[in-house]
Image (cartoon, rainbow, N blue to C red):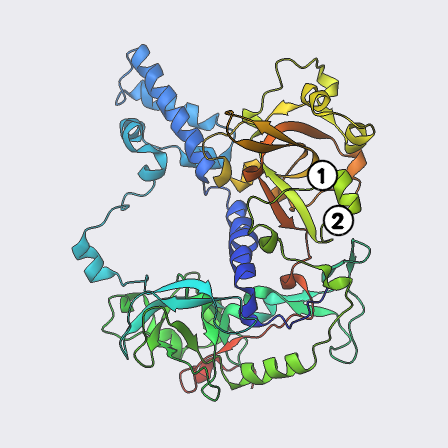
């Protein structure tokens, strides 16, 4: 089991938090919503709308004609992708608008607002920005963008209510054994530290607010607020901000259902929408560039102190773990090939992924191919020492298309680096290009290469530039999946947590 040499604190996982929300919590959540389109679905809808409008013009069909409307209704039903169909306008008359602004903008009728509307209904949320924390081992933190006066609101905090904090419990979590590079279910916890049940909690628990005597927890999704680190008033890095329920004079107070504070947790369970608002307030004058710190509470402080005291260092071999984002900092570094990695392997948690569009990667025109030879296995490719010219004859061309690096859903795939070559592109500069074995398994399919790599069908892609290759943590290898990593709620400030919510006393 991999354990880092320094204790993974709550605030040391800011990067993991963003990955969790975007990839695990956000991406999976929106993927589960069948009628919520992604960017690619809006692009597909734009093509359908523009083609339909050209078709109607060709046959002189008016958009307001009853036959045209029935035809459009039928055309929508034959679109097999549910998310693409959801991106299409219901009203045929909207096709002319789509031609000017696209289906994505059409779906947001209030995309633009006046400055007077913002003054009446909105509140500034750009007072803080993320950056490397000044606290050792804290990872990233939140910093003031501009001077903030004592008592001023730094940021509003809409709160998502989660009536049962047990939803964050993970029983028998999957672990990655770094020495053997295998996955296993953790049934045997350390009896000196943990109970007889091998359990842990999801990382998101660290970013929720709650009370030790309540089953309810609350997560804020305000921009940047979750980067704020802990500093108790008893330490030399003192808190300079605190949270409170939003004041009635705030333009956002109309979104705060204050009567919820007088109801029970059972009442919260019945509420289908967000209805609580807090705000982050400056405890004193804060300078521009100063790190924002708040007190997570005495219970959190005691638990973290105990966690640090009981933390065990691990063997030097397990310490070979290096987070993928560290390796990705040097975007010009040389990527090792499969043979080179046998001599000088990457850390066991690391694998390589490539940006590639299967729609934009035609086979090399000079290649002698047949349909059965296009998809190859790793054993087929590296069973012989193949030259660059040989691999090029059996490969697909890499092409840089619009939006390639923005679409992790369709364009980000596990790969093995086969060959590296230097290419003189303009007579003055040498570029390094790679031939890779690309697995048709996207980032959303688990960010992993199948265990039996030799038996997996894949595609050889040639002339892949360094900028298209990334390092990725294998599943369950990052600190956020370590069962012994620190997990604890942020405590509400004393005196503001409703007594009726304390259902565990």
Q: Residues within 10 Å of mark 1 (few under 14, many from 20)?
A: some
Crowd band around label 2 with a 10 angstrom C-alpha radius: few (<14), some (14–19), many (20+):
few
Residue under label 1: 337
**Residue 449 horizontal side relative to residue 212, left or right:** right
Quarter of the figure with residue 371: top right
* Residue at (44% x, 38% y) in the render: 39
Q: x%, y% of residue 220?
A: 43, 66
Please identify the quarter of the rendering in which residue 332 is found.
top right
| Quarter occupied by the C terminus | bottom right
Q: Quadrant of the N terminus?
A: bottom right
* 109 over 262 or under it: above or below: above
* Sequence-earlier tag: 1 or 2: 1
Q: Which disc, if any, is residue 96?
A: none
**Contact (CB < 8 A) between labels 1 and 2?**
no
Q: Nearer the viewer, residue 315 or 475?
A: 315
Q: Which residue is mark 2?
A: 345
Where is residue 59 shown, x and y percent of the image?
Answer: 32, 10
Note whether 146 is above or below 79 in the view shown: below
> Is disc 2 placed on a helix, strand or loop?
loop
Q: Is residue 282 above or below residue 439?
A: below
| Residue at image point 34% right, 68% down | 155
């Amino acid at each position: 089991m991999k354990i880092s040499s320094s204790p993974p604190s709550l605030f040391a996982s800011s990067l993991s938090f963003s990955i969790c929300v975007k990839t695990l919590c956000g991406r999976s959540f929106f993927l589960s919503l069948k009628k919520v389109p992604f960017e690619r679905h809006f692009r597909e809808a734009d093509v359908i709308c523009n083609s339909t409008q050209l078709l109607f013009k060709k046959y002189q069909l008016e958009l307001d004609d009853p036959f045209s409307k029935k035809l459009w209704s039928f055309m929508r039903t034959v679109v097999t992708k549910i998310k693409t169909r959801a991106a299409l306008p219901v009203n045929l008359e909207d096709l002319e608008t789509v031609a000017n602004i696209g289906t994505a903008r059409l779906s947001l009728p209030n995309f633009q607002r006046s400055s007077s509307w913002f003054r009446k209904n909105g509140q500034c949320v750009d007072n803080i920005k993320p950056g490397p924390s000044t606290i050792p081992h804290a990872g990233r933190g939140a910093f003031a963008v501009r001077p903030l006066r004592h008592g001023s609101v730094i940021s509003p905090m809409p709160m998502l209510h989660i009536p049962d904090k047990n939803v964050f419990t993970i029983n028998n979590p999957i672990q990655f054994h770094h020495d053997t590079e295998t996955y296993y279910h953790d049934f045997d916890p350390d009896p000196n530290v943990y109970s007889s049940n091998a359990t842990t909690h999801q990382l998101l628990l660290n970013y929720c607010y709650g009370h030790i005597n309540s089953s309810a927890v609350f997560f804020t999704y305000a921009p940047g607020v979750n980067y704020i680190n802990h500093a108790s008033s008893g330490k030399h890095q003192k808190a300079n901000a605190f949270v409170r329920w939003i004041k009635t004079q705030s333009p956002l107070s109309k979104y705060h259902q204050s009567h919820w504070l007088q109801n029970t947790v059972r009442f919260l369970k019945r509420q289908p929408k967000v209805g609580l608002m807090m705000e982050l307030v400056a405890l004193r004058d804060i300078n521009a560039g100063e790190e924002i710190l708040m007190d997570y509470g005495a219970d959190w402080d005691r638990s973290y102190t105990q966690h640090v005291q009981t933390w065990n260092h691990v063997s030097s071999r397990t310490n070979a773990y290096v987070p993928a984002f560290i390796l990705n900092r040097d975007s010009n570094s040389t990527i090792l090939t499969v043979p080179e990695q046998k001599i000088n392997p990457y850390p066991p948690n690391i694998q390589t992924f490539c940006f590639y569009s299967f729609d934009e990667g035609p086979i090399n025109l000079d290649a002698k191919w047949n349909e059965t030879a296009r998809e190859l296995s790793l054993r087929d490719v590296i069973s012989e020492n193949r030259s660059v010219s040989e691999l090029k004859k059996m490969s697909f061309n890499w092409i840089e298309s619009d939006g390639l690096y923005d679409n992790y859903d369709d364009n980000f795939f596990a790969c093995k680096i086969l060959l590296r070559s230097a290419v003189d592109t303009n007579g003055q500069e040498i570029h390094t290009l790679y031939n890779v074995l690309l697995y048709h398994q996207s980032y959303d399919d688990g960010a992993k290469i199948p265990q039996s790599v030799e038996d997996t069908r894949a595609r050889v892609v040639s002339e892949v530039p360094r900028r298209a290759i990334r390092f990725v943590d294998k599943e369950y290898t990052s600190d956020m999946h370590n069962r012994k990593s620190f997990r604890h709620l942020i405590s509400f400030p004393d005196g503001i947590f409703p007594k009726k919510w304390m259902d565990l006393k």
